[in-house]
Image (cartoon, grey):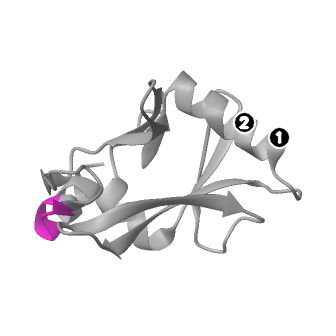
Amino acid sequence: MSRFAVLNLTEAAAERVKSLVARSPKPVAGIRVAVRSGGCSGYTYQVDYADTKGPLDEVVTEHGATVFVDPSALLVLIGSVMDYKESQMESGFVFQNPNETARCGCGESFSVDPAAAAEGAHAH
């Protein structure tokens, strides 16, 4: 995994990203990860197809997969690991984010301490 990457990918996440890109109904450059306001804890992760790299996107390339990190999510995601989990009941991307200070009971949203996230960004 990259030493100073904003986001690291596990092999399982990279394989899922590559599979999604290959099966996309139209050509895409990769997957974009963003953080949006919402949910009962404040933020939710958003994963979508990325047609092209945005002008300020951070590009993460690991295990042959390309993920673009939306610039508004950089401080919230710094130091995170994106994984992919699959079980009989559910499947999806899972984020191990050291900046999370709380997560809602259903696991759909989270909160961060903005000061701590900014401090972590300066440590790199």
Examine the rendered structure and indicate whether residue 124 appears above or below residue 58: above
Badge 1 element: helix
Q: Position of residue 105 (x, y in %)?
A: 14, 51
Give the residue drawn at x 81%, y 51%. Answer: 24
Q: Is residue 69 magenta?
A: no
Residue furthest to the right = 26
Q: How many marks?
A: 2
Badge 2 element: helix
Give the residue drawn at x 45%, y 24%. Answer: 88
Q: Dividing the picture into quarters, in which one does residue 62 lie?
A: top right
* Residue 62 visible, this orientation: no
Examine the rendered structure and indicate whether residue 37 appears above or below residue 94: below
The image's mark for residue 22 is 1
Horizontally, is 40 left or right of 73 in the view? Answer: left
Q: Nearer the viewer, residue 107 or 12?
A: 107
Examine the rendered structure and indicate whether residue 11 appears above or below residue 6: above
Distance CA(mark 1)–CA(mark 2): 6 Å
Give the residue drawn at x 20%, y 52%. Answer: 99
Horizontally, is 21 left or right of 86 in the view? Answer: right
Q: Position of residue 22 (x, y in %)?
A: 82, 40
Q: Is residue 115 magenta?
A: yes
Going by the numbered disc 2, the residue's amino acid type is Lys
> Quick check: marks 1 and 2 in contact, CB under 8 Å?
yes
Q: Position of residue 8 (x, y in %)?
A: 46, 37
Dot 1 alpha-carbon crowd within 10 angstroms: few under 14, some 14 to 19, many 20 or more: few
Going by the numbered disc 1, the residue's amino acid type is Ala
Examine the rendered structure and indicate whether residue 21 appears above or below residue 10: below
Dot 2 alpha-carbon crowd within 10 angstroms: few under 14, some 14 to 19, many 20 or more: some
Circle 2 sits on which residue?
18
Q: Nearer the viewer, residue 9 or 115?
A: 9
Q: Which residues are magenta?
A: 111-116
